[in-house]
Image: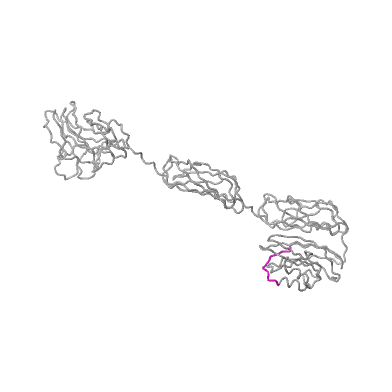
């Protein structure tokens, strides 16, 4: 109770309101929701009045109601005083949003002969920013007669200011008998509707109304009251009705209903979001793991247990649903989160190279009722890269130099440069020289020379040079011929590239009668023409040159660069004296 309440109630009526309104307390928005009084009164007689007060503010409020008899339906502090509500020295002490109803019996002033209305004024301790809802007036007839028989009145109905669709609510209702005879037991009910009473509106709840003696009043507290499910947010009314089935005599049915407003608001719901952490780079077809977080952004609502799904979308927007998992997510408190990890995820073997997305989808089975269903996906990015080649050898014939002119049956030497340009050493490497009358790949079948098996390491700065002896077939005919020099000829070494093992060397076959004799030997070091950019493509037999001026003798070069000294043409092939091969007459 306000510390000055008892003093206020003891002051003269004219000063009472002025004192209450001049207090220094904080502003309080209080409302006189309803005021009921009998339609007739006798001078000096008793009248029963009721009022409902609600605190519309966000702070604690304190107030009381003054009842006076007025001649013009307007409250004046000079009007005849009847009583206070509450009738005791207590006040309406209300928390924010709370309402309270009280009833008391007053004595109608014997001197209020000109009164036409009973007026009620709500007195607030402090400043009320909205005085427009603090007063009410009911007409009263002086000296009239009371209705004959019972007169049940729905005095007030009260409940929460807001609720959600389907929500259970606590409601109360005040009923009174304003007649001159006792009523019989009947019922009371509360309906849910709009601003106009409709007996067919949905019934929220009902309760038995006991028999009431004249002027007796009762507060009813029905149970099982709930806002109808499926109600859209908006402003509605709760209607209290007494004697709906007319099971009791009621001399004035027009006062059997009363109402109060209620706002239906959207129910708070869970709101799940997801986050994911993934590796920045993963090889195509390789496995990876991820970490996930599921949060509940709701204010006040727990999210039930759910599942988390993992999807993969590659750089070509090809989606793989359910890449790995799913993960079980336990209940998530309002404002809380759950974390976890998933292993056994693998980038699809056919995924496009480039930036891919990994999506984690919270509540994948859609079992949680959420306020926002569009924010359940967390996204992480992974760069998908190709699988690197395995560690293998890669054998090439980097150079080959032999005789330029031979006769059938001649013995010769061919000097060969071998390299392993792969990433793994090779052992048991055998290089074979075969004879052919064509420079096309795989046209040579007759073996004319063979190197012994040897080991080739990787990363050597210079080739391994070997001299392989050979013999011209005695059946060789005059004209152009080729020596096909192939390393790993048995194809026993597992290589990164099996198409670069052969170098083709041209030479000319002359008859024994035209044989000029032994050719000069090659005494200069062999040149690694791989370094110069020349090589023979085993698939086509063609040779690429590093550029003008690159000349090789006794190799598969088809022409020399212009303007080179010491170059002689033989059957369309360029010969360089420094690279002349050797042949031996048997």
Decide which of 167, 16 is in the foreground and name it: 16
Is the magenta region chiefly helix, strand or loop?
Answer: loop
> What percent of the width, then of the height, locates residue 321?
50, 42
Q: Is residue 28 covered in magenta? A: yes
Q: Residue 196 in the image: state x and y as whole percent.
A: 74, 57
Q: Does 439 sit above or below residue 82?
A: above
Residue 48's image quarter? bottom right
Quarter of the rendering occupied by the N terminus:
bottom right
Left or right position of 61 against 269 = right
Q: Quadrant of the C terminus?
A: top left
Indicate the quadrant where residue 465 lies: top left
Where 574 falls versus 119 (above or below)? above
- Residue depicted at 25% across the width and 28% down the height: 445
- Residue 46 lies, in percent from the top left, at 85, 64
Query: Quadrant of the rendered structure where residue 314 is?
Result: top left
Magenta highlight range: 22-32
Say which of 329 and 266 sits in front. 329
């Amino acid at each position: 109770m306000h510390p000055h309440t008892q003093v206020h109630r003891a002051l003269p009526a004219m000063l009472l309101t002025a004192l209450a309104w001049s207090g220094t307390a904080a502003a309080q928005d209080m409302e006189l929701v309803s005021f009921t009084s009998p339609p007739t009164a006798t001078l000096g007689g008793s009248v029963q009045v009721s009022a409902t007060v609600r605190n519309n503010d966000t702070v604690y409020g304190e107030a009381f109601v003054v009842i006076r008899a007025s001649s013009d339906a307007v409250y004046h502090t000079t009007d005849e005083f009847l009583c206070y509500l509450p009738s005791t020295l207590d006040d309406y002490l209300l928390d924010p949003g709370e309402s309270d109803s009280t009833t008391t019996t007053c004595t109608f002033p014997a001197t209020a002969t000109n009164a036409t209305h009973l007026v009620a004024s709500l007195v607030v301790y402090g400043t009320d920013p909205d005085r427009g809802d603090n007063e009410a007036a009911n007409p009263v007839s002086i000296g009239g007669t009371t209705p004959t028989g019972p007169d049940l009145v729905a005095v007030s109905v009260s409940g929460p200011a807001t609720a959600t669709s389907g929500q259970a609510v606590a409601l109360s209702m005040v009923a009174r008998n304003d007649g001159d005879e006792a009523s019989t037991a009947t019922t009371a009910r509360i309906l849910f509707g709009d601003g106009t009473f409709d007996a067919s509106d949905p019934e929220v709840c009902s309760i038995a109304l006991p028999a009431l003696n004249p002027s007796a009043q009762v507060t009813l507290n029905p149970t099982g009251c709930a806002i109808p499910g499926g109600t859209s947010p908006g402003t509605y009314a709760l209607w209290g009705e007494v004697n709906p089935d007319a099971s009791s005599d009621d001399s004035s049915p027009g006062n059997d209903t009363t109402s109060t407003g209620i706002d239906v608001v959207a129910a708070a719901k869970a709101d799940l979001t997801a986050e994911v952490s993934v590796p920045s780079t993963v090889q195509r077809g390789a496995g990876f793991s991820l970490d996930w977080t599921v949060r509940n952004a709701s204010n006040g609502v727990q999210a039930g247990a759910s599942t988390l799904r993992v999807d993969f979308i590659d750089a070509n927007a090809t989606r793989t649903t359910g890449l790995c998992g799913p993960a079980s997510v336990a209940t998530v408190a309002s404002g809380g989160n759950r974390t976890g990890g998933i292993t056994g995820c693998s980038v699809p073997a056919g995924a496009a190279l480039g930036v891919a997305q990994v999506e984690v989808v919270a509540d994948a089975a859609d079992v949680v009722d959420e306020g926002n269903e569009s924010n359940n996906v967390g996204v992480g990015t992974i760069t998908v890269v190709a699988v690197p080649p395995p560690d293998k050898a890669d054998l090439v014939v980097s150079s080959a130099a032999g005789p330029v002119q031979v006769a059938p049956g001649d013995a010769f030497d061919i000097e060969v440069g071998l390299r392993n340009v792969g990433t793994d050493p090779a052992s048991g490497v055998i290089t074979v020289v075969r004879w052919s009358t064509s420079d096309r790949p795989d046209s040579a079948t007759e073996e004319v020379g063979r190197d012994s098996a040897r080991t080739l390491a990787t990363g050597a700065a210079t080739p391994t040079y070997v001299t392989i002896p050979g013999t011209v077939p005695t059946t060789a005919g005059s004209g152009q011929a080729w020596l096909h020099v192939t390393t790993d000829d048995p194809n026993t070494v597992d290589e990164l590239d099996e198409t670069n093992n052969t170098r083709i060397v041209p030479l000319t076959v002359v008859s024994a009668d035209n044989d000029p004799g032994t050719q000069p030997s090659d005494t200069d070091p062999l040149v690694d023409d791989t370094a110069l950019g020349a090589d023979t493509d085993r698939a086509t037999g063609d040779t690429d040159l590093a550029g003008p001026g690159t000349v090789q003798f006794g190799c598969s070069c088809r022409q020399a660069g212009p303007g080179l000294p010491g170059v002689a043409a033989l059957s369309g092939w360029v010969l360089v004296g420094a690279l002349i091969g050797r042949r031996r007459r048997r």
